[in-house]
Amino acid sequence: MFEGLTERIASTLKSLRSKGRLGASDIDEIASELSEALLEADVALEVVKEFVETIKSRSLQSLAEATPSINPASQITEIINQELISILSGDGSRFTFSKRPPTVIMLAGLQGAGKTSAAGKLARFLKSQGNTPLLVAADLQRPNAVTQLQLVSESVKVPVFAPEPGNGVGDPVRVAKDSIIFAKEKLHNVVIIDTAGRLGVDQEMMAQAAAIKAATDPDEVLFVMDAMTGQDAAVTAKAFSSGVGINGIILTKLDGDSRGGAALSVARITGKPIRFISTGEKPADFDYFYPERMASRILGAGDIATLAESAKQAFDSDTAARLEKKFVEGDDFTLEDFLEQLQAMRKMGSFSKLLGMLPGAQSGAMKKQIEGLDDRELIRTQSIIDSMTPGERRDVKVLNGSRRARIARGSGRSVTEVNDLVERFQAAQKVMKQMRSGTGIPGAQMAGGPGMAGMPGLPGSFSAPGRGVGGASGGRGGSQPPKKKSRSGNPAKRAAQERG
Ligand code: GDP
């Protein structure tokens, strides 16, 4: 998401930095470049105009007040950052649970926006935080909507209240009302009501939504909106917001080929905040929306906070503690440890998606590297390790020719790929030793803490036998895009450089 926008903003900021002293004409230039970049990203014209005007006047003011010690380029970058956060924050409210459970969340949205999947993802997300949600099938119109919600409920292991068959049968207002009584009885602390979606926001849809709202007095009415539909979606959301009243937005399909404009437009046009985002088809591709993180991404500064959280979630605390202990005590880092880390990384989600959260990841060179990455390569690597005996994983030195041939056969890979993996693993082992005796653990902050000690060198070293990503950030400790070819002062990074 935001690739085009980020790339253009990055180049604008770069030309800004190269200028040193800035005058009013430079600000004009930046303003028009920003304008173009935002329009290209499908941000609504009125939003662009307002945004750029604010940036312009604040920048001019800051230039007038600037002292020589303050770098004007970084000051303007910070102004853009603040304004992005301000737009993306909508009315600034946050999702809050009701003091008197259950917290009632009503979902509305157009057909195909991803409402049913969002209901399941939201339920799963809240459940993972220790809540006891109940899904409610109050879309009794769309063919198979009830069945679809039942399937979603099974997949996320959250119960569903579905007393009516749907397909035009049953009263959705009654179902919604009854669901609250049911939730109180069964001690569900959150109720997520899926209401009817339509092809467009029409009077009938709004009347039904308003009736459900009146009957259930929801704490949150969230409009589910497909980011791919760009500005149109913002207009639809606004119509629904005026007609029924909403508290916020769930923005879906942010992983798609959207140009990112929807996120900026919808928050400004409706004046309501984006509460949650969906970034893929899997139940886990869902999170709170953080305006600061999104602004950081748009400005090409990555999203380290989300990356760190994914890492923490993927490594259960026992594994993290054990790997850290091993690392600190100087035990050998084995292929078994590596396999464990690979598995944790797969839990974290798509590899290229993760890398996309790194600073500079949307810039040209880095983007190419990431696009060239294939998540299936991680799986292939894992299949090779799976075909080894525990003894072989603990000590790769026993891997003679015939063992390697057996592993290749067992995993359906070639002997060259097996050799490549072993070679890369041994190189990484060496790096681990150097890191232990060296000055620091590169990327430990990036990866979310000491539990990730072993991670940094690995993605680059192992993901792709014969086609590693060492040239991308993974092999360089993951915190910076590659800049120049100087030798790193950090022993681990240097070894990675020499290797790759
Ligand atoms: P509804 O008609 O609004 O209930 O939409 P659905 O929940 O049935 O979703 C419509 C389609 O969009 C399905 O194929 C979903 O898998 C897909 N979808 C939903 N959310 C996302 C997302 O965040 N990313 C992607 N790539 N697809 C999504």
Image (spheres, rainbow, N blue to C red):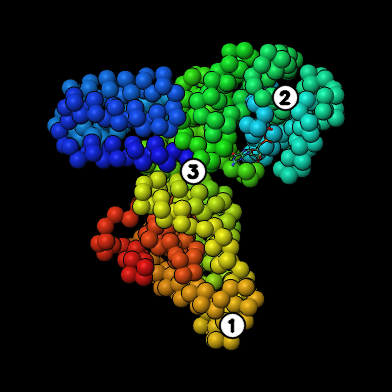
Q: Amino acid at mark 3?
A: Thr
Left or right: 343, with 434 as reference point: right
Which residue is found at the position 19% from the left and 40% from the top? Answer: 18
Residue hosting label 1: 405
Q: Nearer the viewer, residue 491 or 118?
A: 118
Q: Position of residue 29 (x, y in %)?
A: 24, 29
Q: Is residue 360 visible?
A: no
Residue hosting label 2: 196
Residue 306: give its label. Answer: 3
Say whether disc 2 or disc 3 marks the residue closer to the N-terminus.
Answer: 2
Which residue is found at the position 65% from the left and 76% from the top? Answer: 410
CA neighbours of label 1 inside 10 A, class few (<14), some (14 to 19), many (20+): some
Which residue is found at the position 68% from the left and 20% from the top? Answer: 218
User: Quick check: 59 above or below 436?
Assistant: above
Q: Position of residue 339 (x, y in %)?
A: 57, 66
Quarter of the displayed picture in which ligand 1 can be seen:
top right
Say whether disc 2 or disc 1 marks the residue closer to the N-terminus.
Answer: 2
Q: Amino acid at mark 2?
A: Ala
Which residue is found at the position 41% from the left and 19% from the top? Answer: 46
